[in-house]
Amino acid sequence: MNRQTRREFLRRTALAGGAVALAPFGAHAAEAPVDMAIARWKGAAASEAPAIQAMAVKLTEQAMAAVGGMGRFVKKGDVVFVKPNIAWNRTPEYAANTNPDVVATLVRLCLEAGAKEVKVGDHTCNDAAQTYPNSGIEKAAKDAGATIVNVDKKRFKQVEINGKRLKTCPVYPEIVESDLVISAPICKHHNATTVSLCMKNFMGVIDKRGIFHQDLPSCISDLTAYLKPRLCVLDAVRVLTANGPTGGSLDYVERRDTVAVGTDIVAMDALGAGLLGYEPEKIGTIAAGHAAGLGQIDYRKVPNKEIAVS
């Protein structure tokens, strides 16, 4: 285990110990940060772009605050990698990529918490020269102070995953060398895995995705176990209900006006599946992650808080 990965592991272990120490639901639970926060918009309906942007920012801020703030995860001098969906040449209203205002808010909160650098990038499926600007993420993240990472295929490194199904895999080094990786996907349908959420989002840090198609649930679970995620942010301001992962028609897009933040990646995906109308137990990636001990398939069993934001 290299130095950065070891530090990540030790910090994750310490946080996990803190989570165990949290009191159960009751009087003492309110005194400590929860491990999942679900912020839902209850204010006036937002239909114009500026109002939707302001709503996305407020939802993200309040969900992060409820889990203890970004300072729970980011220490002074850390390098953070925010991994959104930026795979597709679609503008934000088509819900194929993460909401740019959610991403920009995460970047700002990381820097305010003392991060030395916040990187944002994805191994895109469409041409990055088009997807980065058209997604709206490139400009929003840059304006918030992020370093935009243009993934260079020559830099992928074969690493030992040692998973149940996935033994080795080419992973982008800037991911594993970061002090914190934030999985920040949009909540959407996917024709191969039914849903694309926090675990599936990590396919954007690897090369040669075809190797995953031997067994997508097991391989995604194996990669997730290797990366040891500590923080996930699920963008469900808009959700893509069909024709995923690319979308392409506004007929497939619905508003949920929700942003969730959590430390349990399986629970976060279980929540996302529910937002899309699916039972988590019937989703292969979620069931595989739960079976591998990566998290709780019933998100309600994770110390959580629902927040009405207006």
Image: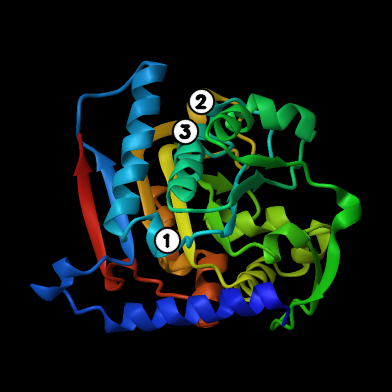
Q: Position of residue 43 (x, y in %)?
A: 20, 30
Compared with 51, 180 (above or below) is: below
Q: Amino acid at mark 3?
A: Asp
Residue 197 seen anywhere in this rendered image of the structure: no
Quickly name the residue at label 2: 93
| Neighbours of disc 2 within 10 Å: few (<14), some (14-19), many (20+) | some
Look at mark 3 in the image and give the residue it sits on. 101
Would residue 292 appear left or right of 262 to someone viewing this image?
Answer: right
Q: Outermost residue toward the left?
A: 27
Label 3: element kind: helix
- Who comes first in sequence, dot 2 or dot 3? 2
State the residue in front, 221 or 229: 229
Q: Residue at x 20, y 79 (%)?
A: 23
Q: Residue at x 28, y 67 (%)?
A: 300
Q: Amino acid at mark 1?
A: Met
Q: Residue at x 87, y 50 (%)?
A: 153
Can residue 300 be seen at all in this image of the molecule?
yes
Quarter of the N terminus within the rendering: bottom right
- The residue that mark 1 highlights is 268
